[in-house]
Amino acid sequence: MNTYFSLRLSGLLLLTALLAGACHSAKSTRVDYTQPDATRDKKIRWQSKRTYTFEGSGVAVSNQFAGARLNDFRRENDSTFTALIKPENAPINNSAWYAFKIWGPQPKAVTVNLVYQDGSHRYHPKISRDGRGWQALPAAAYQADTAQHVAQMRLDIGPDTLWVAGQEIFGARDFQRELAPFLALPFVRQRAIGESKQGRAIFKMDIGEEKEPRRLVAIISRQHPPEVTGTYALLGFLRTICGESDLARQFRREFGVVAIPLMNPDGVAEGHWRHNTGGIDLNRDWLYFNQPETRVARDEFLKIKANPAQQLFMFLDFHSTQRDIFYTMKPELETVPPHFSEQWLAEIQRRLPDYQVRERASGTKSPVSKSWFYLTFGVPSVTFEIGDDTPRESVDRLARVAAEVMMEQLLDYVAGSE
Ligand SMILES: [Zn+2]
């Protein structure tokens, strides 16, 4: 720990206790998701949207933009401030998202303490001068004590807005921009299939040469708002499937892909840590479907089930967590194609010898998307998790190889079974 921060962090601990109430740790309350009402609406604590200004200090801070999360901002002295960050409700998974803009009339260095309620510091700060290009705040300007819930950063502010956030801010507009090149392709279609709780459109993409493909792969992502690295993997995966390789062309003749890239548009816009605006973790609502976002997705995918001319072959759900990991189904749960995810992961590992493929298999108890897809379709169902801090170029490489191997192995499987 460098001297600058070691002097400051001790004082900050007291401050944390004062601001956040007694030291809350992330609550360990277990929710019984087998109960039908476990995913019924819970109360949200809305953040008040405002711009904080401090006379004499020349510092202004705002959360008045999509994706922002800042619950309070206080001045300690003219160059030190404390940001209070709370989740949308609790108990909640500790995905302690924060995002704000900060500026001032003169160039100036300020210290900002991050203090949390109902959670603790998780994300290394990212900064941006335009809200689009992002970089990690240099390590020398940042110190965190996750056990004590706090972090501190030194920011160089000035008349130009500085964006500060837990990860790169990547919301509905960014999806539109990044997906636009795909949507311009003749074999990609996009359609609104329903609405979120706050009335935002939920979009589905169809990729494939056939209007009504016989064989399909289903993909969803961004049930959890801060999980931006999962979105990067999704984009790399789709880019490979939409690419110009012979493999991708052949795959698109034989298979269709149905993707819902942004499952929780409200949570992303509201800067939520985890939940939709019903206050619910959407990836625990795949049993009773109490939330509109999961119902929209379920109803769309059930059309495949209802169509005797169509068959689903694989399901993928992109997320982020502490490190890259594939959550698969236990091997004794038989799938069609058989043993597909084992073979897929083994081949990814073979092609990336300097990369460690991690896998954890589970059953169907937890009402997450992959359980529902397995129980409904009997297909290999995988939660594709990318680490919060995985280098972005390594996300791209993994996504590309994962897509290539999936396309090859699915094509081999149908060639061998006909
Ligand atoms: Zn997640």
Image: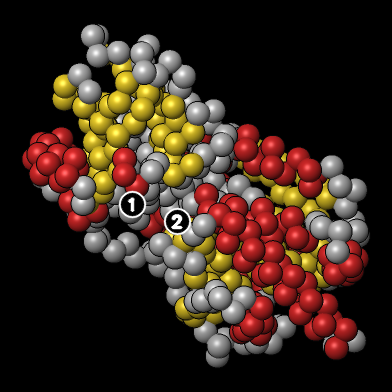
Q: Amino acid at mark 1?
A: Arg
What percent of the width, then of the height, locates residue 35? 38, 64
Q: Amino acid at mark 2?
A: Asp
Q: Earlier in the sequence, mark 1 or mark 2?
A: 1
Residue beneath the point at 42% across and 38% down: 165
User: Considering only vertical position in the picture, is 95 above or below 349?
Assistant: above
Q: Is residue 401 visible?
A: yes
Q: Is residue 21 visible?
A: no
CA neighbours of label 2 inside 10 A, class few (<14), some (14 to 19), many (20+): many
Q: Nearer the viewer, residue 170 or 274?
A: 170
User: Considering only vertical position in the picture, is 372 above or below 44?
Assistant: below
Residue beneath the point at 64% across and 82% down: 350
Q: Nearer the viewer, residue 54 or 334?
A: 54
User: Considering only vertical position in the picture, is 410 above or below 177?
Assistant: below
Residue beneath the point at 25% across and 31% down: 111
What percent of the width, then of the height, locates residue 91? 29, 52
* Residue topped by disc 1: 122
Tags 1 and 2 in contact by the CB under 8 Å rule?
yes
What percent of the width, then of the height, locates residue 55? 24, 9
* Residue topped by disc 2: 388
Check residue 23 in the rendering and tell me which mark sits there, or answer none.
none
- Residue 41 relative to residue 339: left or right: left
Q: Residue furthest top?
A: 55
Q: Nearer the viewer, residue 35 or 45?
A: 45
- Residue 326 relative to residue 396: left or right: left
CA neighbours of label 1 inside 10 A, class few (<14), some (14 to 19), many (20+): many
SS at circle 1: loop
SS at circle 2: loop
